[in-house]
Image (cartoon, rainbow, N blue to C red):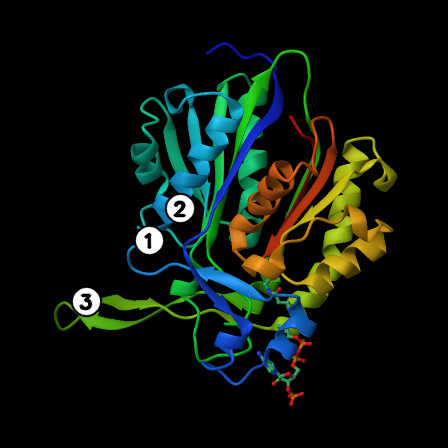
Amino acid sequence: MKAYSQGVAIIGSGAAVPSQTLTNEELSKIVDTSDDWITSRTGIQTRNLANETESLSQIAAQAAEQALTMAGITAAEVDLIILATSTPDDLFGSACQIQNLIGAKKAVAFDVTAACSGFIFGLITASQFIRTGVYQNILVIGGDILSRWVDWGDRTTCILFGDGAGAVVLQAQTDRDNLLGFEMCSDGTQNGCLNLGFDGKNQYLNSELAVTKGSYQPITMNGKEVYRFAVAKVPEIIEKALYRANLSTDDIDWLLLHQANQRILDAVAKRLKIPPEKVLANLNKYGNTSAASIPIALDEAVREGKIKAGDIIAASGFGAGLTWGAAVFRWK
Ligand code: COA
């Protein structure tokens, strides 16, 4: 294979959420909480939840099709599909189901798992395939249906999450590279802060030999630790990505953070001295949609006409792992 250098441009976006909504008011009839508590501690007001007729592959395919339309390319032109998710419909991966649904016949498709950092990690992974000249058109999708794995009796976690999917199209360019800088980090020593772990028991196949049978258990989280981690690490990694891009915070048009909690968004922006009007936020409407939150917020801001061609966006995802990452890019 010929190895040559190409630049990356992000040329289309899309988003989709399931049709059911759950407001804080309705949630307060399910667990002991209140609209006032959730709004003041998180900024979340409502979220969308998938029922059994809706799959991750379906909403991800909807988001992908919108992104392709905006990019002005067909599914047949897609070389690679990366699905960032922690909640595939199939534990073997859901990217190939999406490939089939959208008819991206020539694309190779696989899943990436990095929780709420998944979209940023997927975007950076995809850009490597473009920069090395291997692929021309790549779909990066972030999607999650965390409602399947939330304990709906645990008020400390169930109030936070919502379901959805967002997608972008990356395209190879010969005259520019709009991925200006990036950085990724992991800290496995803090793995116990946020988990969706498998729990199983021995099933004996004969008197000596056992296999483990069980299932994944609902999300557990040390909210305070995760909060502290996000507020400390996210500003730091954005500064590193900016440094790699040879830019400063003043050059940023938009701060696009994983939509976990309005207080985290505010604290990170304050530390970076970025004014509130440059901070993209829509978590009041969707809650924390994990790998989907960044592309959903990006797509919304693009379609509302806030983000314009040439704008510089500093995006950062953070979450279970623990993992965190940042990408500074120019739109279109
Ligand atoms: N409704 C009402 N009260 C609640 C509640 C709820 N949904 N959840 C917790 N409480 C109570 C607690 O029991 C506690 O009561 P106590 O003081 O009588 O013990 C009180 O509210 C304060 O709880 P605390 O856990 O200290 O709240 P907090 O200010 O830390 O906010 C989070 C909790 C989860 C909102 C916050 O820690 C957070 O956002 N963390 C980051 C989580 C995150 O973003 N995770 C995903 C990352 S990808």
Left or right of 156, for residue 249: right
Q: What is the x, y in percent for residue 232?
A: 76, 59
| Residues under numbered marks 1 and 3 in contact, where contact means CB atoms less than 8 Å apart | no
Left or right of 275, for residue 286: left
Closer-to-camera residue (284/193) = 284
Instruction: Report the number of numbered marks.
Output: 3
Residue for badge 1: 54
Q: What is the x, y in percent for residue 137?
A: 49, 22
**Disc 1 and disc 2: Cα gap in Å?**
7 Å
The quadrant in which residue 267 appears is: bottom right
The label number, if any, that marks residue 209 in the structure image: 3
Amino acid type indicated by mark 3? Leu
Amino acid type indicated by mark 1? Glu
**Nearer the camera: disc 1 or disc 3:** 1
Q: What is the x, y in percent for residue 152?
A: 43, 75
The residue depicted at 46 percent of the width and 20 percent of the height is 73
Q: Residues within 10 Å of mark 1 (few under 14, many from 20)?
A: some
As drawn, 10 above or below 256: above
**Disc 2 and disc 3: Cα gap in Å?**
42 Å
The quadrant in which residue 250 appears is: top right
The label number, if any, that marks residue 175 in the structure image: none
Amino acid type indicated by mark 2? Ile
Residue 323: in sight, yes or no?
A: no
Residue for badge 2: 59
Q: Residues within 10 Å of mark 3 (few under 14, many from 20)?
A: few
- Quarter that holds the C terminus: top right
The residue depicted at 65 percent of the width and 42 percent of the height is 301
The quadrant in which residue 83 appears is: top left
**Nearer the camera: disc 2 or disc 3:** 2
